[in-house]
C-alpha cells in the first residue's frame, strides 16, 4: 500500500510538471476575441449568475416538442457557442488552483498505481498502462466534447498529445515503484 501511495504522489508530480511544460509548449488553438471588450460588456449586461451556457439555449428537460424543433433549426443554422461564465475574476495561477490540479493528478495516479499493482507484467507493459489511462480518459471525455459540443479539432488533437504524454511519464514513474503481481502458475 505504501508503494501505491508513493507511486501516486510521484506519478502525480511527474504528470503535473509534464502539464506545466506541455501547456507552455503546445498550441491548444485558443484564440483571442478581436472585439473582447464588446463581448464582455454584453456578457456582463445579460448574464448575472456563473454557469455553463449553450447558444442557442434551451431547457431540454422542460421544453415542448415545438420548442425542441425550433432549437434544432437554430442550432443547425448557427452560430453555436459554449460560454463558461464567471462574473467575478480569480487569480489565474494561484496556489489554490495549482494545489487542486496537483491533488487531482496525484489522486488519478494513485488509482492508476492501484490498478497497475494487479498486473503481472514486465516494466514496459506496466508503464504502457499509463498512456492507456490517458487514451481512455481522452476518448470518453474530450472526444465526446468534440463530437457533441464541437470543440475545435486542433484543441482536441493537442489534448490527446498532452494526455498521452502526461500519462506516459506518470506510467513510467508508477511502473518503477509498483512492481505488479507475479503470474500465477
Image: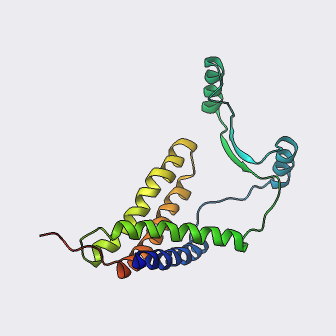
Residue found at the very far left of the displayed protein: 185
Q: Quadrant of the C terminus?
A: bottom left
Residue found at the very far front of the displayed protein: 1
- Whether 66 is drawn above or below 48: the answer is above
Residue 87 coordinates in the image, percent (x, y)? 82, 52
Residue 161 coordinates in the image, percent (x, y)? 47, 66
- Residue at 61 percent of width and 21 percent of height: 69
Q: Would residue 136 appear left or right of 50 to someone viewing this image?
A: left
Choose between 152 and 3: the one closer to the eye: 3
- Whether 55 is drawn above or below 85: the answer is above
Residue 168 coordinates in the image, percent (x, y)? 41, 72
Residue 114 coordinates in the image, percent (x, y)? 39, 68
Residue found at the very far top of the displayed protein: 66
Choose between 113 and 145: the one closer to the eye: 113
Residue found at the very far bottom of the displayed protein: 176
Quadrant assignment, res 46: top right
Amino acid at each position: 500500500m505504501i508503494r501505491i501511495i508513493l507511486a501516486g504522489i510521484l506519478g502525480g508530480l511527474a504528470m503535473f510538471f509534464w502539464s506545466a511544460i506541455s501547456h507552455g509548449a503546445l498550441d491548444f488553438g485558443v484564440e483571442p476575441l478581436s472585439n473582447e471588450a464588446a463581448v464582455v460588456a454584453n456578457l456582463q449586461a445579460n448574464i448575472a449568475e456563473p454557469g455553463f451556457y449553450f447558444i442557442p439555449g434551451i431547457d431540454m428537460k422542460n421544453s415542448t416538442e415545438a420548442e425542441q424543433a425550433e432549437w434544432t433549426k437554430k442550432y443547425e443554422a448557427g452560430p453555436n457557442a459554449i460560454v463558461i461564465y464567471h462574473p467575478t475574476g480569480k487569480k489565474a495561477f494561484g496556489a489554490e488552483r495549482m494545489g487542486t490540479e496537483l491533488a487531482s493528478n496525484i489522486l488519478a495516479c494513485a488509482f492508476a498505481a492501484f490498478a497497475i499493482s494487479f498486473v503481472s507484467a514486465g516494466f514496459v507493459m506496466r508503464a504502457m498502462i499509463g498512456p492507456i489511462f490517458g487514451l481512455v480518459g481522452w476518448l470518453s471525455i474530450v472526444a465526446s466534447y468534440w463530437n457533441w459540443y464541437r470543440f475545435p479539432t486542433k484543441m482536441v488533437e493537442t489534448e490527446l498529445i498532452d494526455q498521452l504524454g502526461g500519462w506516459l511519464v506518470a506510467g513510467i514513474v508508477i511502473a518503477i515503484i509498483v512492481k505488479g503481481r507475479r503470474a500465477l502458475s
